[in-house]
Amino acid sequence: MTLRIGIVLLFLATIINEASSQAKNSKSARKIIVQNVKIDDKTRISIYDGVIGAEKITVLSEYAQNGNLQFVQENFDYAMDNGLTPFLSVLDREEFSKSKANDVIKSLVKKSIGADVKFTNAYMELLHSLDPKPPVVQFCRENVYYATIFLPNKWGHNMYGQLSFYTISTNNNVSSTPREEIVHTVHPKPGRIVVWPSCALQAAHPPAVNYFANLMMLRLVYTKADAEETVSEKFLMKDPEKPKLGDWTFTNADSKREIDYASHLKRSYFDSKRRGIYVLDDLYTPAELKQFRNILLETSSLRVSEYDGFALEDNDNVQWIASYDVEEFVKTPVWTRMQELLFFLTQENEWYPYDVAMNYIRPADHTRIHPDAEPHQVEYTFLLYLTENVTRTDFGETVFVEREKRKSDGIHAFTNPGGEEYEPIAAVWPKYGRVVIFRNVIEHSARPLSTSHLACRYTFACKASRSKRLSLIKQVYEKMEAIDDGTKEFAKLNQDLSTGRHDNPAKSKLSTEQLQEKFDDIKAKISQQMADGLRDVASNL
C-alpha cells in the first residue's frame, strides 16, 4: 500500500509540475485560470483550473478505488450531522506531506488566503447517486482550510455533482425562519481545484440518478502555519490494529446449542431441475447477529468495483464489497453452523468455502441477475441478512429467476446481448437475521433498498464447494483471471480448471497439495505483478 501511495503521489506531482512548467515555458500550454468568489463577509473561495490535466486523472481514480476504504455511514447519525460522503479513502499523511504535489497545492492555498499553511490530512470522497448530503459546516476550525480536487475522467453538465456554498438568509415572502440559500455553485470539472475555509456552509451534490459510477473528489486539509493542528474527523484518527476473524467466537452461553434446522426452515423453492432455495429464520440470536456483524465490520477489507455498463450482463454489479480470508472464516462458529446446515440439506460433510464477503448495497446501485457457479458445478451460496430496521416497504429482496427457454428468432441473441428473458422463481425479503441458502447455479440478483431507507443493505455471503479440493480449484482459476503470462500452458490450465477437468483427483495429474501450491504461487505473482507495474509507472515519470 505504501508503494502504491508513494507512486501515485509522484505521478500527481509530475502531472502538476508538467502543467506548471508548460504554463511558464510554452505558448501552447494549458492556461491556469483562477476565480475568487465572495460567499459572505467572512467566507471567500478560490477556484483553479488548468493545474491538473484531465487526461492524467485516471491513475488517481484507480488509486482511490484500490485504496483503504472506510464506510463512515455505519454511524448514520454521525455521517449525516457532519455531511460526510458515505465512502471515504484515507491517504497516508506522511507520504503525502513529502510530495511535490502537496507543495504545489499548498502554494495555491497560501495564495488564496494570504498566509502560510501546513499540510494536515488527505482523503478521497467517492460520491454516489442518491447519497444524502445536507448542507453543513463540516468540522469548522477557524484556522483550517480545504482544497477539493475533482477527479472524474469526464463530466457533463447534466451529470450534476456540483459543490455548492450557502449563506443563511430570510425570505419573508416565504417564512420568517432563517434558511440556507445557495450563493455559488462549482461544477466538478475534471482537475478543478476549490480552496475554501472549513467553516463554510457547503454541500457536495451527488451525481444524477442515471450515472451509476462514483464522483471522486480528493480532499486536502491545511492548517495555518502558526496555528495548532487539530483533528476532529474520527475517520482520520489512526485505527487500532484489526483483530483476526479467526480469533473471534460467540460469547453467549448457549452459542453451542444443538439446532433443529428443520424447525427453522420456513419455505423452500425449486427451479425446473429441482435445485433448491431454502429460507430459514432465527438460526442466530439477536446477540449473535450483533456480535457477528460487529466483527465483520471490524475486520473487513473493503474494495470498490467499477460499474459495468456493458450490454452483456454477466456479473452481479455489486460495487462495494468487503472480503475475508477463507482460512480465517473456517475457524469461526458461523462456518460451523453453515456446515451443519449443508449436511442437513445434502447429507454431505466435506463442503468448503471459496469466497467469503459482505456486500454493501446502496439505494442507487444497479445490481444484476447472475449465477455464482458454472453449470457443471455443485455449489451453495449462504446469505445472512444483517440490515436492521428494514420494513417491507423498503423492498431490497433477493430475486431468484430462471431463464425462459424459447426458440431463437434468428437475430435476437446476436443483436441484443443481455436481452435474455427471465421468469421469477422466488423473491426473499431481507429480514434481519434471515438465512437463504441455495444452489448457486440458480441465477439471482440482490435488489437495492428503496430510497426511503437511506442507509445500506448489508448481506454476508459465503460460497462453498463440495470439497476443499474443489474450493481450491475455484480459487485458483478465479485468481488466474487477474494475471496472464501469455503462454498456451497457462491458458489451457485456466480452461481445464474452470471446465471441471481436474475436479476428480483420480483423473487429474494435479494433487490437492499441488493445487494449494499453485494457489499460493498465483497470489504471490499477482502481488509481484502489481508491484512491478507500479515501478514501471514510477520509472516513466
Image: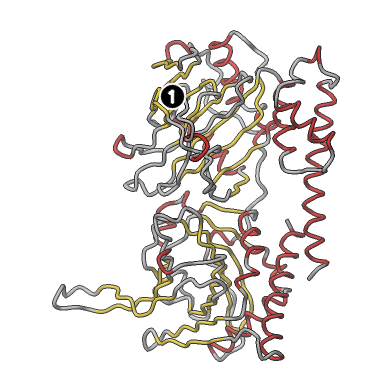
Residue 24, percent across and down?
A: 69, 91
Residue 143, percent across and down?
A: 52, 81
Say if 413 sits above or below 277 in the image: below
Say if 79 sits above or below 196 in the image: above
Q: Residue furthest front?
A: 410
Asked which quadrant contains residue 519, the reply is top right
Residue 246, percent across and down?
A: 67, 32
Nearest the eye: 422 or 258:
422
Q: Is residue 364 left or right of residue 324?
A: left
Q: Residue at x 55, y 38 (%)?
A: 315
Q: Residue at x 80, y 30 (%)?
A: 493
Give the amino acid at mark 1.
Answer: Glu
Q: Give the quadrant of the C terminus.
A: bottom right
Residue 174, percent across and down?
A: 15, 73
Q: Residue at x 65, y 85 (%)?
A: 29
Say if 294 sits above or below 106 in the image: above
Q: Residues within 10 Å of mark 1 (few under 14, many from 20)?
A: few
Nearest the eye: 186 or 159:
159
Q: Is residue 108 left or right of residue 491?
A: left
Q: Residue at x 80, y 28 (%)?
A: 516
The chosen color scheme is secondary structure
Q: Give the quadrant of the N terminus.
A: bottom right
- State the residue position of label 1: 404
Q: Residue furthest left?
A: 173
Label 1 residue SS: loop
Say if 169 sits above or below 444 in the image: below
